[in-house]
Amino acid sequence: MAERHGLPIGSVERLTALLGALEAEPHPPTTICDPARAVDEHLADSLSGLRVAGLRRAGRIADLGAGAGFPGLALALALPAASVDLVEATTRKGEVMERLAAAAEIHNTRALSLRAEELAAFEGREAYDVVTARALGPLVVLAEYASPLLREGGVLVAWKGARDPAEESAVARARARTAMETVEVLDAHPYPAARSRHLHVLAKAGPTPRGLPRRPGMARKRPLA
């Protein structure tokens, strides 16, 4: 895995430490803690995002709904020159991610106990090159979350399952209200048993539209399309 993705020297040992810390965590924010499964379903899946050129070049990354720290922790280890913010509203999950990062000696991350809308309203506004989101919600909701966080030209990388034409068309219909448009959808095969995995890459094609971010919760309650 390290060779395939061109990871830094020492990455194998640090990834092993990360999985060991996750397995030992007494209150993990994920049901997949067994290293034999987690190496595929967390690490390999997360690192599949490195196929996106904009992600490899990113200086600042915000991982939304970071949960147990994936893909954010894996990407931070793979991209030591990048600064990765693990955005997770639940404080307890943020504390777990901090312990995992310490165990794996990942020093280019910080856990932020905020919702995406709260971050975008203050220090995070138009501050990021890339926003990542893994199994977090509908694409149009993710586009709304990402837009005010991204600089113009920045990208959202969303890890999703099977393609949904209705979900993808909603992104196009909301373009004027999010300034986000789909650039490509990549088939992803991060490990042999993976099925129907896709990486959706959306670019911010203009300034942040007025009215974004909306109040926390509105993106899900009343989607823009």
Image: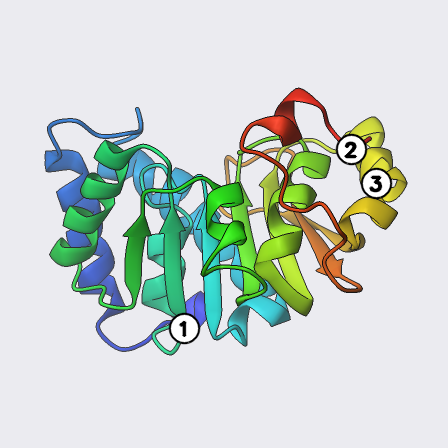
Place of residue 47 in the rendered image (x, y in percent of width and height, measured from the top left): 45, 56
Give SS at disc 2. loop
Please state which of residues 191 and 84 is positioned toward the viewer in this rendering. Answer: 84
Q: Quadrant of residue 81?
A: bottom left
Specify which label sits upstream in the sequence, 3 or 1.
1
Tell me the mark number nearer the camera, choosing from 2 and 1: 2
Tell me the mark number nearer the camera, choosing from 3 and 1: 3
The reply to whether residue 127 is in sight is yes
Spatial CA distance of label 2 from label 1 is 31 Å
- What residue type is disc 1 on? Ala
Q: Mark 3 highlights which residue?
A: 174
Residue 80 left/right relative to 167:
left
Does the residue at mark 3 contact the one at mark 2 (Cβ under 8 Å)? yes
Place of residue 97 in the rendered image (x, y in percent of width and height, measured from the top left): 24, 45
Residue 68 left/right relative to 213:
left
Callout 2 environment at 10 Å: few (<14), some (14 to 19), or many (20+)? some
- What residue type is disc 2 on? Leu
Q: Mark 2 highlights which residue?
A: 224
